[in-house]
Image (spheres, helix red, strand yellow):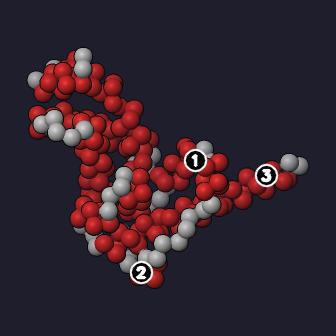
Amino acid sequence: MTQKQLIKACKKQNLKAQGQLYQLYKDDLFVLCLKYCKNREEAQDNLQDAFLEIFSKIKSYKGSGSFEGWMKRITINKAIDKYKKERYLNIVINNDILRDHSLVETNIIESMPLDQILKYIQDLPPRYRIVFNLYELDDYSHQDIAKLLKISVNTSKSNLHRAKRILQTKIQQSTNVSHKNMTSNGH
């Protein structure tokens, strides 16, 4: 079945087609969920919620633009909605830290396993993780993030900077630990 036929069958609430669509896209959307959620369980819940919304709103998909992009927007929005419901922390703006500082050297990041970097991102406080992912990984502007999260542009910039600083610290600590382990083992 082509993607177009699959979408058409899903619009008719064909369960077999919905199952095929789920199987076809679940892995890619799960990776997306992992970026926005703090752990695998939360990501799995977000994936299920996203697919429920995809199936309930699929009739509104008119075929213009990428279907994958449409599903990704729903998935990201589900994670953001959950974040908004759970948000209980005050966000403090410090204009002194809005200047962008370079992260860790590129060769250090490139040598790290992807799952380790993802774990560091997942460990970020929710408000920092969401802004970091939207800006750095999904190409949203600070203006778009501010509208989406109902925060100021400066808060978005501040949260991005803080996320980068936390990641920088974690990456540097991890490389220092692995370097110490290598030197203590005689390498």
Frontmost residue, 52 versus 7: 7
Task: From the top left corner, tell me how far across and down residue 171 is, in percent.
Answer: 61, 58
Q: Position of residue 89 (x, y in %)?
A: 35, 68
Mark 2 highlights which residue?
94
Callout 1: few (<14), some (14-19), or many (20+) C-alpha neighbours within 10 Å?
A: few
Callouts 3 and 1 close, C-beta under 8 Å = no
Give the secondary structure at mark 3.
helix
Q: Which residue is mark 1?
A: 116
What amino acid type is highlighted by mark number 1?
Gln
Q: Is residue 50 visible?
A: no
Q: Residue furthest front?
A: 64
Question: Which badge, 3 or 1, is on the more N-terminal residue?
Answer: 1
Q: Looking at the image, which residue is at 31% across and 72% down?
A: 153
Q: How many marks?
A: 3
Measured from the top left, where is residue 141 in percent x and y?
Answer: 32, 62
Q: Quadrant of the N terminus?
A: top left
